[in-house]
Image (cartoon, coloured by chain):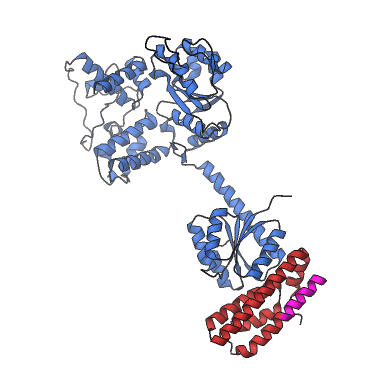
Amino acid sequence: MSALDPDIAGQLAEDLPPAVFRRIIATFEVDLARLTAELEVCAATGDKAGYLRAAHSLVGTAAAVGAKRLEFEARLAMNPAQSELPTSLLPRLSAESRAALAALHNLTKA
Amino acid sequence: MSEPRGRILLVEDTPTQAEVAKALLVDLGHEVRHAETGTRGLAMALDWLPDAILVDLQLPDFSGFELMRKLRAEGSEAACIVITANASVNTAVEAMREGAMDFIVKPYGRARLKVTLDNALEKRALKAELTAVKQQLNRGRFFGFVGGSPAMQAVYRTIESVAPSRANVFVTGESGTGKELVADAIHKASPRARGPFVALNCAAIPRDLLESEIFGHVKGAFTGATDNRAGAAKQAEGGTFFLDEIGEMPLEMQVKLLRFLQTGSFQPVGAARPEKADVRIVSATNRDPLAEVEAGRFREDLYYRLYVVPIELPPLRERGDDVLVIARHFLAQFSKEEGRRFRGFSREAEAAVIAYPWPGNVRQLQNAMRNVVVLHDADMVEVAMLPPMLLRGARPVGSVSSTPAPNPVAAPREAPPQAVHWEPQALPASPSPPPAPSPPAIEPLAAMEKRMILAALDQTGQDVPRAAALLEVNPSTIYRKLAAWRAAH
């Protein structure tokens, strides 16, 4: 399954001027770094509320650019009922973040 | 470059989402501003007055719903569109209940955003148009006027239409209908609003002083002219010159006014050279101007110069519900001024106010309300507090009463008009016939004259020209007497 939803990411790349699309990717990259760092700190300190808040923001961030696999993992993290530990979830989140970024960059070259 | 389609405020705290939304909005041709918090969003909405606000529900300081509540409380008319990651029916219902015009689920594409915004902006434009039309059709107030009757709406519309032009306006209407208010409204709604508004009552000035009052004089022009003095025309330079009771202007003065209207120049009394003044003329009379022309009392050429845009003010008796609206307005105003408790009228008092024909129009109603407030204090105006003429179903000035007036002073000549004193009287439940008139007591002529004049003024709602007509004297006689009595005080 592709890291990106073509209806969202592909449409953005198609509709917007390249410079604007690149600016969105840059913003996304900064957001990813900030939010994944927040998740890690919250997981390490046991700050569950902060963890859920950061996961919620990550869901919105991923959805905005159509990073559907990352959004899926972030939704798991923001679900207070889920039992998976951050130690197993966070590495998958990081991997999906990298995949989404790479896929977005690929769109700029297309 | 084309004009932006709409002013859109985006309230969104997540940078990536904000960046995407901004890019799409700009791409759709909108002017966009962005706030990251609810507090900042509220301030920007009130300052920038956007057409639509895209509100994220989860904001760092308070929720998007809370922001919409605050916007509504502040009177914002922007169309709110909720952005939510939660597509549940509950969220949609709550968003609508909180005043959102629509909601959009994340993630959204360009097409979805366009449809949602276009719908919201169109709805908002239609709502604004409807509000504007309603306001125009149902204005309850307009500059100094109170009342929203159809007759007054027509007057308001004419004032609005004529105000921006330079056209002379001729206001007709019975005394007390608000002719000077029309002139004032025209001035305030015109490009001359920053200039002076000068009103001059032609009936209040002795005829030999009228020229000097209008055009001024130079030192030594006549006995007592110790200095150069600018007249009303010059004082109104760049503004509006209101000539009230123009029907009272002597014919020889009408010639000079006509020349001023034709050339824009005039000659102060005693001056060697003409002067110029740029004024817009609004004139008024309570007489039928054409009948005055036909009777030879008003110059036809001047009539056509002044009668460019006529505005006829309806008498109060033809203004339907305005009578009560205006009565309540004055009651509230005077109660506040006099420290009284009045909050309204009893049903019987309302019926009496509505039934009375108000021959002295708004001015008479104003005086009646002042009388009630000054002489009484209660929560409600009861029927017994109203001036007696209202309770007797009094007829307007000029009508012939079938019963003799109880007060000989109030019935000076021929057909006795209504009693003119408004002191409250304890009225019997069913009025008994008035007592037979007794011969008038003899008193000094000056005292009698004063009583007669005051009676005539009371009778006509303090309308000097009308009182003068009743007494068959010139209005300036009454003004002069009033001034003398005030000076004697």
Quadrant of residue B398 in the image?
top left
Work out whether residue A9 can be spotted.
Answer: yes
Give chain B's shade.
blue
Horizontal relation, residue B134 to residue B417: left or right:
right
Is residue A60 one of those drawn in magenta?
no
Q: How many marks?
A: 0
Q: Please state which of residues A44 and A5 is positioned toward the viewer in this rendering.
A: A44
Q: Position of residue B122 (x, y in %)?
A: 64, 54
Horizontal relation, residue B414 to residue B214: left or right:
left
Q: Please state which of residues B209 and B141 is positioned toward the viewer in this rendering.
A: B209
Horizontal relation, residue B72 to residue B56: left or right:
left
Q: Residue at x 32, y 46 (%)?
A: B343
Is residue A105 one of those drawn in magenta?
yes
Q: Which residues are magenta?
A: A98-110
Main secondary structure found in the magenta portion: helix
Q: Please state which of residues B260 and B89 is positioned toward the viewer in this rendering.
A: B260
Give the vertical position of B363 relative to B449 (above or below): below
Give chain A's shade.
red
Give the vertical position of B407 relative to A3 (above or below): above
Horizontal relation, residue B84 to residue A15: left or right:
left
Q: Residue at x 28, y 16 (%)?
A: B413
Q: Position of residue B87 (x, y in %)?
A: 61, 73
Q: Position of residue B322 (x, y in %)?
A: 42, 38
Q: Position of residue A62 (x, y in %)?
A: 67, 75
Q: Quadrant of the C terminus of chain B?
A: top left
Quadrant of residue A92 in the image?
bottom right
Work out whether residue B411 can be spotted.
Answer: no
Give the vertical position of B211 relative to B360 (above or below): above
Q: Residue furthest right?
A: A110
